[in-house]
Image (cartoon, helix red, strand yellow):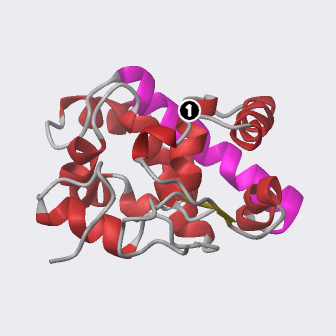
């Protein structure tokens, strides 16, 4: 039986996420954008809640196509607010649409979102060697810098804690604990 990080429950969806995505470096603009939107939607909720709704998010947010999302009109926003398959929080929905436009601007400015976002860790993952999940921080200097920069660019729902969870989700940080079968001791 595989030993996983303590936060990972017995839920097969959670285990799949833990085993195949969390802590795995991702340099793809499309998936980096998706995870930024999902981490913002997660604010104040458990991650498993978002994972269970992820496929529906992909469907109703046009596979996280930022170009389409940035052009959503009020009719589309109203549809999203009525959709029980996602988190129906007006601020979170509006932030996803706002963030799509800001994402596109960063792509234009920096050549890619990946180049921009990975600069906060020097382009390489930070690999930590925690003994217990209680040692893992909720934010770091890097996530605070990322948050500050994203906010300066006009992004919403990108506080330091959300940014740190995002960094873990896209493999900018590897926080698998030493007892986890995925640890890079």
Q: Secondary structure at mark 1?
A: helix
At 43% from the left edge and 64% from the top edge, which residue is drawn?
A: 22
Q: Which residue is mark 1?
A: 161
Image quarter hosting the N terminus: bottom left
Q: Nearer the viewer, residue 24 or 174?
A: 174
Magenta span has 97? yes
At 62% from the left edge and 68% from the top edge, which residue is drawn?
A: 29
Please, is residue 160 above or below residue 130 in the view? Answer: above
At 36% from the left edge and 67% from the top edge, which residue is drawn?
A: 180
Q: Position of residue 172 (x, y in %)?
A: 64, 61
Q: Nearer the viewer, residue 10 or 179?
A: 179
Q: Provide the major secondary structure of the magenta segment.
A: helix
Apparent side of residue 49 relative to residue 91 in the rendered image (left or right): left
Residue 155 appears in which quarter of the rendering? top right
Say few, some or many: other residues with alpha carbon within 10 Å of mark 1 (under 14 / 14 to 19 / 20 or more).
Answer: some
Apparent side of residue 10 relative to residue 36 in the rendered image (left or right): left
Magenta span has 72? no
Q: Position of residue 99 (x, y in %)?
A: 60, 41
Apparent side of residue 131 relative to residue 114 in the rendered image (left or right): left
Image quarter hosting the C terminus: bottom right
């Amino acid at each position: 039986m595989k030993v996983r990080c303590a936060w990972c429950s017995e839920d097969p969806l959670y285990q799949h996420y833990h085993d195949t995505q969390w802590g795995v470096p991702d340099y793809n603009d499309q998936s980096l954008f998706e995870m930024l939107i999902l981490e913002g939607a997660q604010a104040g909720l458990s991650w498993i809640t978002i994972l269970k709704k992820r496929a529906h998010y992909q469907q109703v947010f046009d596979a996280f196509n930022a170009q389409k999302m940035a052009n959503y009109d009020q009719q589309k926003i109203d549809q999203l607010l009525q959709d029980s398959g996602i988190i129906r929080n007006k601020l979170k929905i509006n932030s996803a649409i706002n963030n799509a436009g800001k994402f596109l601007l960063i792509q234009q400015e920096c050549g890619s979102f990946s180049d921009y976002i990975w600069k906060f860790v020097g382009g390489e993952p930070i690999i930590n060697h925690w003994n217990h999940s209680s040692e893992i921080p909720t934010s770091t200097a890097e996530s605070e810098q990322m948050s500050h920069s994203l906010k300066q660019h006009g992004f919403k729902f990108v506080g330091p804690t959300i940014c740190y969870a995002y960094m873990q989700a896209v493999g900018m940080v590897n926080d698998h604990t030493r007892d986890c079968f995925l640890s890079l001791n």
